[in-house]
Amino acid sequence: MRYLIPLVLFLVLVVFLAIGLTRNPDDLPSALLDKPAPTFRLPQLKDPAKTFSAEDMRGKVWVLNVWASWCIACRDEHQYLGGYAKSGAAPIYGLNYKDRSENALAWLGELGDPYVLSAVDFDGRVGMDYGVFGAPETYLIDKGGTIRLKHVGPVTPDVWNKEFLPLVQQLNRQ
Amino acid sequence: MTRLSLLAFLLLCLLSSAASAQVQIPDEPSDDPAVEERLARLSHELRCLQCRNQTLADSPSSIAADLRREIRTQIKAGKSDQEIVAFLTQRYGDFILFRPRVRPTTYLLWFGPFVLLVGGLFVLFRYVKQRRDAIAEEPLTAEERRRAEEMLRS
């Protein structure tokens, strides 16, 4: 009995710490979930004379992927993005975040371009409106322009299949 | 061996600096000390989301510099502290605040310690009372007193 209480307290602590270890520290509750995607109009990476706006995507379910050539995790994620784009589930648009366009273009040239197009957010101001604090971050936006999902960190096939795809299919039916 | 590892280390430093060609817009402090003072006060209360345990004021990261620049712009535009904090929490959530807001999800955080304190005091008082009752002296009976006096006399 004398040793039972400390033992139980210890075990409770172990359980809480074990749960804590399995949680992803990047998994912050997004303030923008189920809110309208912030509007922007930015030049396109491959054709700076043209612009791209979130408004252009009204009526479509689409994915906005925040990336940069300096971002190491983006390189990791990039190998999968082409596959997601080819599957035709949802068009993937890039937001080239705080990057130099020459580096970004070289990166796409080297690794391939999975994006319909990328918009240039040179100073990160649009990223700020989207609550970006590090790349890669990925948003799923519905036909009405509402953010339905946000993922911080690389969208691995596991994340894509379990979180994005079911929601994309559901949103496309609406 | 050590020379080789040093070389590898230097090479790694070089590579990582080449890889992190992130756009850095330099900080331009305002000439108005009042603006800078408000920026310092606000940014000490706000978390750098990339580095988690640093404030926006202390963090050298690029996103922290961007947010400081944005706060400075908003101060110059005549926004109140509440408006600026609202701007940030709309985008980054309450997590950006180092002082959590009092709301149902944070009740445990705010009031939990006081509940523990009251509970602890209750347990302490009960324990002390139990002990006092256990060691309280019972008065001697007449027979015991007679025997004690007898012993003292002899």
Image (spheres, rainbow, N blue to C red):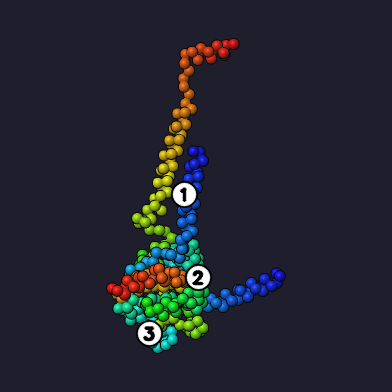
As drawn, is A107 to the left or to the right of A165? right
Q: Chain of mark 2?
A: B
Q: Is residue B129 above or below residue A90?
A: above
Q: Quadrant of residue A145?
A: bottom left
Helix, strand or loop at mark 3: strand
Frontmost residue, B65 versus A71: A71
Using the image, tell me which numbered label, if any, was put on residue A12.
1
Q: Nearer the viewer, mark 1 or mark 3?
A: 1
Helix, strand or loop at mark 2: loop
Helix, strand or loop at mark 1: helix
Discs 3 and 2 carry the same chain letter: no
Q: Residue at x 43, y 65 (%)?
A: A27
Percent from the top left, x then y, of residue A9?
A: 48, 46
Residue hosting label 2: B61
Q: Amino acid at mark 3?
A: Thr
Percent from the top left, x then y, of residue A121?
A: 43, 79
Q: Chain of mark 1?
A: A
Q: Quadrant of the N terminus of chain B?
A: bottom right
Frontmost residue, B28 versus B154: B154
Q: Amino acid at mark 1?
A: Val
Frontmost residue, B66 versus B104: B104
| Res. B33 in view | no
Residue hosting label 3: A51
